[in-house]
Amino acid sequence: MPAGFTHDVLIIGGGAAGLMCAATAGARGRSVLVIEHANRVGKKILMSGGGRCNFTNTGTSPANYLSDNPHFCRSALARYTPRDFIALVEKHRIAYHEKELGQLFCDDSSKQIVAMLVAECEAAGVRIATGCAVERVIAREGGGYAVHTAHGVFAAPSLVVASGGLSIPSMGASGFGYALARQFGHTVLPTRAGLVPLTLSGRPQEQLADLAGVALPVRAASGKVAFDNAMLITHRGISGPAILQISSYWQLGQPLHLDLLPGQDALAVLQAQRAARPAAELKTVLGDLLPRRFAQRLCEHWLPNRPMKQFNEPQLRQAAELLRAWPLVASGTEGYRTAEVTLGGVDTREVSQATFESRRAPGLHFIGEVLDVTGWLGGYNFQWAWASGHAAGEAV
Ligand SMILES: Cc1cc2nc3c(=O)[nH]c(=O)nc-3n(C[C@H](O)[C@H](O)[C@H](O)COP(=O)(O)OP(=O)(O)OC[C@H]3O[C@@H](n4cnc5c(N)ncnc54)[C@H](O)[C@@H]3O)c2cc1C
């Protein structure tokens, strides 16, 4: 280690990206200190995937990420793939399974993933300081950084910011990484909650609130983007995987369009039902295709309810169009309190895609969610944390 430094590498944030970076750099012989202000590392990993951590997605590709600079993530994702992380999981004999669409979960508990990362850090001689609040960071004359903390001052030629985004403040999330980025001349793109339930207000909220708990498969579309998955009606709005996914693309004021019979031709379905059951009312017909209470509600507020034979062709087309693209105006999101991720963040144009080093401040690195790279729901966010953490860990 160069004279005058306490470590080769300081990492602020002992979450997914920070621990991966620490283990990788430590395994290369670097002396590494992870500075974590919470009382334990990996809190978000622990709560992830309903306690079973959806730790990767076998179908990961750059197309699964949102960023103002969409090609930035390509290199790191190609250099550390889901296969690499699965090999690590298998090395630690952690049993896992595929749930759907390439999403891999622990059979047992997300605690195993945290234990695995901590074990890798220990094997690589990494020091982890928990309950260690950072007071300030100073660029030293002649290079390197001094980090003033509750546990004293540490200094190293390389400083890695792995402090995550703003979601779930109660788990240790802070805007610290963004403030530090600004301190060193970086642009921070506007942040907002992603993978988050949407709220309704006024009439749609009143019309749906008592259906809280009803779930159905939909195709949720906002602009040109659409996701096929389940939607759940909540007391305050809508949630479920399809809604969480589309929430990352949805902008306030934009309508959402929900295909209530995804994968089916709604007009053909209605025409067939009219031929087969001419005396049945629309709500009865829809009650066999959708959750019954939801179908009834649709026919109270959005669709005319009468026997199928009383729908002429244009009227049937109108009903089919509503089922294909039910318009719902969300009034907002549930915010960072429940969001899984933060969209926006440190502008990746000012960071090397190979080493994750700042183009503004030599020796400073940004990895994980603090960067303007946000994955879809389904293990993509952890894969980004592993891939970016690994790339920086190879470089510092
Ligand atoms: C409820 C929930 C469930 C999720 N489930 C999944 C899932 O199943 N699959 C998936 O891929 N993604 C999931 N995510 C997203 C995933 O957890 C994050 O994308 C990922 O953890 C980001 O990794 P990170 O290392 O960048 O940040 P984090 O894991 O958030 O780690 C940042 C760390 O920095 C620490 N920190 C912050 N500020 C400071 C400071 N000033 N000083 C010192 N330390 C600081 C924090 O305490 C934290 O430990 C979920 C998120 C949530 C909230």
Image (cartoon, rainbow, N blue to C red):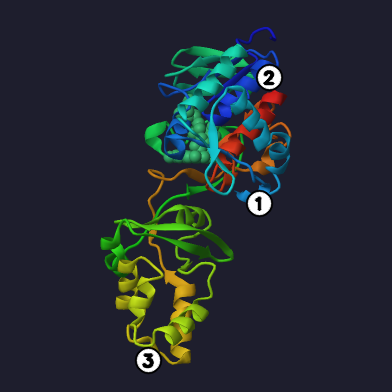
Image position, residue 305 (x, y; %): 32, 83
Image position, residue 17 (x, y; %): 57, 30
Q: Which residue is at the front of the view, 265 or 386? A: 265
Q: Determine whether 148 is above or below 377 in the image.
A: above
Q: Earlier in the sequence, mark 2 or mark 3?
A: 2
Q: Earlier in the sequence, mark 1 or mark 2?
A: 1
Q: Looking at the picture, which amino acid does disc 2 mark?
A: Gly
Labelled disc at residue 80: none
Q: Are marks 3 and 1 in contact (CB under 8 Å)?
A: no
Residue 336 visible: yes
Query: CB of residue at label 2: within 8 Å of ligand 1?
Result: no
Residue of label 1: 63
Q: Looking at the picture, which amino acid does disc 3 mark?
A: Gln
Q: Quadrant of the C terminus?
A: top right
Q: Residue at x 47, y 90 (%)?
A: 314
Residue of label 2: 143
The nearer-to-camera label among 1 and 2 is 1
Q: Which residue is at the front of the view, 151 or 112? A: 112
Image position, residue 364 (x, y; %): 64, 27
The residues bearing labels 3 and 1 have C-alpha atoms spaced at a distance of: 46 Å
Q: Earlier in the sequence, mark 3 or mark 1?
A: 1
Residue of label 3: 310
